[in-house]
């Protein structure tokens, strides 16, 4: 079959973050090139035919990022970001969550279909300093590139800025059987895209950099590496790309406009490969692409750019010829049926800066904003009310489920949005229709994934329930308990506490 090649970023150009008043352009750092850091795979504590055990530790450390002093950072089983976690579908998974940080945190499994609110790890599942909590679950979902990050509202953005984010790979027999690159660290490469600003002695200062529309920095970090280089030893690479930034969109292309095939999005393989030479990711979106270097030879370099700034160099070495081809069909997407009598849920994302809201309200920790029966498929219409010529793309994320993108303003979704997703960028003035179904009961958040926006209140909660059974009661975190805990851990009075997003609430006389 002939391959159509897409040459644009799909999203509305007037809404790119390059037009923000507070936009921080990327700059090439004054630092030597370094080998791209490839996170180690986290080793299980124990594994049987049916079960697997892990320990995931949130810890503080120091990381050599720039010449000079090491940067104080946080990570999972590492000084920054974390070791890559691999979860096989079908096995019962046990995880010990250890907090070795000086303050409380949570462990949010972004993209995993697990019960909420405690296993899911949003703001209602705090793990206090020195504490270990145990969770367990069995995954029943397609193979996907997901991730783990902190989610203690309203300090999610600051903790992610410190480094609390790492890849979580969900695997199954189907994806393992496909002719794709599978050798982790050699031809199957995770790429966590982030940006930071470094202050005196190479340190991070989140408070100094704070912007209610999203914190950005001029220095690109790929897997925590500045000016990275990857040595290519195989003809084809599978790149698992995560937009792990607080705010930044990444508009990616290679030198020579080298084409590539996107094979997966957030929550599954695509039904078929989509061939392109430009790719835009909004915050928290993921894409798996396969790049073929058949036209290059040893000694050449291929560069990955975001807009016009180089962010990663691929140094070509000698490799064996690889004549494998991608299948025309990757995954059968079984679209759930929607009862035509089921009402459409309408959600409005409004505002910018401190004014961000969902459905005209700011997030309240103990308020349930919506309910939905387990197993019921429902259309959700997500509208971004920002002005088309001056607004911004809001990436919309739902915890604890995977959805299908049905349409954009009544038209077909973008060509690379036909698999399951958990995050979708919504253009200003646009309504995106999603098909959403929850398979597990619980309380789940849905929000903008510009992290400062969720901390600032652009977030709500839905409770899912089993029809015919009493609605369960969950112990939900309250703001006073949270604030008192953070103040105590930081050795200050609650009145002196500053956290990301608090200004957005105080400006409107609200409490979270």
Image (cartoon, grey):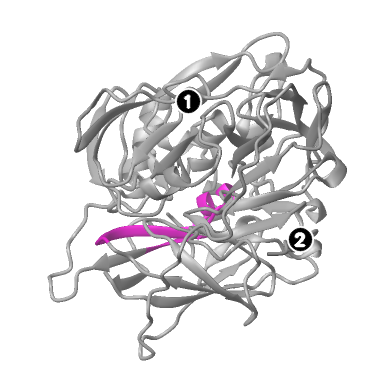
Q: Position of residue 385 (x, y in %)?
A: 64, 73
Give the residue displayed 42% in from the left and 73% down from the top. Answer: 335
Q: Note whether 342 is above or below 64 in the view shown.
A: below
431 with respect to 303 (left or right): left
Residue that protrudes farthest toward the top in the picture: 68
Q: How far apart are the alpha carbons under marks 2 and 1?
A: 37 Å
Q: Position of residue 484 (x, y in %)?
A: 35, 37
- Quarter of the image with the C terminus is bottom left
Q: Is residue 460 magenta?
A: yes
Which numbered tag is attached to residue 236?
none
> Range of the magenta residues?
440-461
Q: Position of residue 210 (x, y in %)?
A: 65, 40
Residue closer to the observer: 379 or 41: 41
Give the residue displayed 37% in from the left and 32% down from the top. Answer: 104
Q: Nearer the viewer, mark 2 or mark 1?
A: 2
* Residue 226 seen: no
Residue closer to the observer: 15 or 483: 15
197 with respect to 44 (left or right): right
Which numbered tag is attached to residue 75?
1
The mark nearer the N terminus, 2 or 1, is: 2
484 with respect to 284 (left or right): left
Q: Which residue is mark 2?
A: 6
Q: Is residue 3 magenta?
A: no
């Amino acid at each position: 079959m002939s391959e159509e090649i897409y040459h644009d970023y799909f999203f509305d150009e007037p809404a790119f973050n390059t037009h923000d008043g507070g936009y921080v352009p990327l700059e090439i750092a004054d630092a030597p090139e370094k080998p791209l850091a490839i996170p180690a795979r986290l080793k299980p504590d124990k594994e049987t035919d049916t079960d697997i055990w892990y320990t995931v530790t949130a810890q503080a450390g120091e990381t050599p990022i720039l010449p000079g002093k090491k940067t104080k950072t946080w990570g999972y089983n590492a000084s920054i970001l974390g070791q890559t976690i691999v979860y096989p579908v079908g096995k019962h998974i046990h995880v010990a969550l250890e907090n070795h940080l000086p303050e409380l945190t949570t462990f949010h499994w972004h993209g995993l279909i697990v019960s909420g609110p405690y296993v899911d790890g949003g703001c209602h599942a705090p793990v206090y300093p020195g504490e270990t909590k145990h969770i367990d679950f069995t995954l029943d979902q397609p193979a996907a590139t997901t991730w783990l990050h902190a989610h203690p509202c309203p300090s999610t953005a600051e903790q992610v800025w410190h480094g609390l984010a790492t890849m979580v790979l969900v695997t199954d027999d189907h994806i393992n059987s496909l002719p794709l690159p599978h050798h982790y660290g050699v031809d199957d490469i995770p790429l966590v895209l982030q940006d930071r600003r470094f202050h005196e002695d190479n340190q991070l200062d989140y408070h100094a950099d704070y912007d209610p529309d999203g914190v950005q920095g001029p220095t690109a970090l790929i897997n925590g590496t500045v000016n990275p280089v990857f040595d290519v030893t195989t003809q084809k690479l599978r790149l698992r790309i995560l937009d792990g930034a607080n705010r930044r969109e990444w508009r990616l292309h290679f030198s020579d406009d080298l084409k590539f095939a996107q094979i997966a999005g957030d929550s599954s393989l695509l039904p078929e490969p989509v061939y392109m030479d430009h790719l835009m990711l909004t915050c928290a979106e993921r894409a798996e692409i396969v790049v073929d270097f058949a036209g290059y030879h040893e000694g050449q370099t291929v560069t990955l750019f975001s807009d016009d700034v180089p962010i990663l160099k691929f140094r070509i070495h000698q490799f064996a010829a690889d004549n494998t081809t991608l299948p025309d069909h990757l995954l059968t997407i079984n679209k759930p049926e929607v009862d035509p009598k089921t009402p459409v849920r309408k959600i409005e994302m409004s505002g910018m800066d401190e004014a961000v809201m969902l459905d005209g309200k700011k997030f309240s920790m103990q308020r349930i904003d919506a309910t939905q029966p387990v197993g019921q498929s429902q259309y959700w219409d997500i509208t971004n009310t920002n002005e088309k010529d001056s607004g911004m793309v809001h990436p919309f994320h739902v915890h604890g489920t995977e959805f299908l993108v049905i349409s954009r303003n009544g038209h077909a979704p973008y060509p690379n949005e036909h698999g399951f997703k958990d995050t979708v960028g919504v253009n200003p003035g646009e309504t995106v229709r999603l098909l959403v179904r929850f398979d597990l009961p619980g309380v789940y958040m849905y929000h903008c994934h510009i992290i400062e926006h969720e901390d600032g209140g652009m977030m709500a909660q839905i409770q899912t329930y089993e029809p015919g059974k009493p609605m369960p009661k969950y112990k939900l975190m309250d703001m006073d308990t949270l604030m008192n805990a953070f103040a105590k851990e930081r050795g200050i009075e609650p009145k002196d506490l500053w956290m990301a997003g608090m200004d957005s609430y105080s400006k409107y006389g609200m409490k979270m």
